[in-house]
Amino acid sequence: MTLPSTYADRNCSLARTLEVVGERWTLLIVRDAFFGARRFGDFAARLKIPRAVLTSRLKSLVQEGVLTRDDEAGAGVEYRLTPKGVALWPVVRALMNWGDEFYSPSGAKRAFRHDRDGGLLDREGRCQECGQVVPVPAITIERGPGYEPDGTEHDPVSGTINTPRRLLEPFVRSEGRKAS
């Protein structure tokens, strides 16, 4: 039996959630927004996503209230996670943990630390140093033991994302200007 093309009329929270974030590119856009990507060009460069698909996904995420679109952001449009979008962090983290466990034999590709005390976070986001569940803005991301260069380091956006930094903070390229 073929699944319906949409689940909007279903009385199931998971099905309705899949309508918003269940497409591959959408979760990768959300992940990169946590990593600091904010501009269309940064998402396009990092993900190698077709521009029409990216336009559609960003528009949908804004309509659903996962991202906001800021047309007054200096040199161009910026997309930022809303509180509803930030609430997706446990889902993104869980999927990354699952991928690390089953598809990264060398270990986690990225490690997360409590910015305040430098403690590593466990799979549930709890600091191993102080025991707190760390809120997203207080998490620093860095390369994990399973990180393997894949050639994207030469792309300025990927290179920036692969350096230690706090989640949600827009990144600054090595030339000292915000990534665009």
Image (spheres, rainbow, N blue to C red):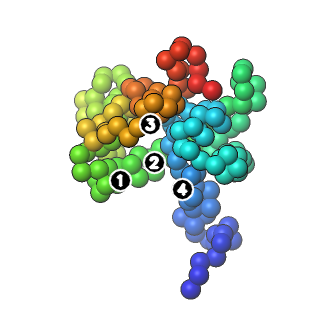
Nearest the viewer among 119 and 169 is 169
The residue at 54%/64% (across/down) is 14
The foreground one among 8 and 171 is 171
Residue reaching furthest to the right: 71
- Where residue 173 sits: x, y (%)? 52, 21
Pick the quarter of the image with the N terminus: bottom right
Q: Residue 99 carries which label?
A: 1
Q: What element carries label 4?
A: helix
| N-term mark: 1 or 3 | 1
Q: Is residue 30 left or right of residue 53?
A: left
Mark 4 packing: few (<14 Cα in 10 Å), some, or many (20+)? Answer: few
Foreground: disc 2 or disc 1:
1
Which residue type carries mark 3? Answer: Thr
State which tag comes first along the sequence, 2 or 1. Answer: 2
Checking the image for residue 111, the label placed there is none
| Secondary structure found at label 3 | helix
> CA separation, marks 4 and 3?
19 Å
Residue of label 2? 92
Horizontal side of 121 relative to 77 (left or right) equals left
Left or right of 157 on screen, residue 132: left
- Going by the image, does 16 lie left or right of 138? right
Dot 2: within a 10 Å radius of its alpha carbon, few (fewer than 14), some, or many (20 or more) residues? some
Residue located beneath label 3 in the image: 152
The answer to whether 51 is drawn above or below residue 12 in the figure is above
Label located before the other in sequence (3 or 2): 2
Cα separation between marks 3 and 2:
21 Å
Crowd rating for badge 1 (residues with CA inside 10 Å; few <14, some 14–19, many 20+): some
1 or 3: mark nearer the eye: 3
Q: How far apart in space, not on screen, are marks 4 and 2 (Cα)?
A: 12 Å
Q: Which of marks 4 and 1 is nearer the N terminus?
A: 4
